[in-house]
Amino acid sequence: MSLEMLENGKRGVVTRIDGGGSAREHLLALGLVPGVPVRKLQGGLSGPVLVEVLGTQVMVGHGLAMKVVLS
């Protein structure tokens, strides 16, 4: 399941980042790396997604949130 599909308030663990290049580097720099737990705070199937990762709130655009795969 991708990050943008996760229900608000639910948790998941990053399993992989799809895509490549600068998008992948940006997500990794935000702390969205494989093995790290995240909690989706708000966001829907369009627009940005607010997540908590490593004790910090991070806003991720919808397109990037689709590249973050969770378990």
Image: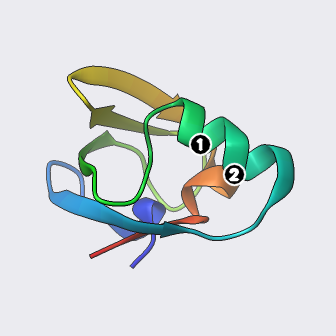
Quarter-wise, where is residue 12 in the image?
bottom left
Task: State the residue position of label 2.
Answer: 24
Q: Is residue 31 above or below residue 3?
A: above
16 and 4: which one is in front? 16
* Mark 2 vs mark 1, CA separation in Å: 5 Å
Q: Amino acid at mark 1?
A: Leu
The x, y position of residue 51, in whole percent, is 34, 37
Which residue is depicted at the point 39% across and 59% down?
34
Q: Amino acid at mark 2?
A: Arg
- Please tell me whether mark 2 sits on a helix, a strand or a loop: helix
Q: Is residue 58 above or below residue 63?
A: above
Which residue is depicted at the point 51% across and 31% down?
30
The x, y position of residue 2, in whole percent, is 45, 71
Q: How many marks?
A: 2
Q: Is residue 34 above or below residue 15?
A: above
Asked if residue 34 lies left or right of residue 35, the reply is right
Label 2: few (<14), some (14–19) or many (≥20) C-alpha neighbours in 10 Å: some
- Please tell me whether mark 1 sits on a helix, a strand or a loop: helix
Which quarter of the figure is the N terminus placed in?
bottom left
19 and 2: which one is in front? 19
The x, y position of residue 60, in whole percent, is 55, 38
| Residue 68: mark | none
Is there a contact, CB below 8 Å, between mark 2 and mark 1? yes
Which residue is depicted at the point 42% across and 61% down?
3
The x, y position of residue 7, in whole percent, is 25, 62
Which residue is depicted at the point 15% across and 56% down?
10
Task: State the residue position of label 1.
Answer: 27
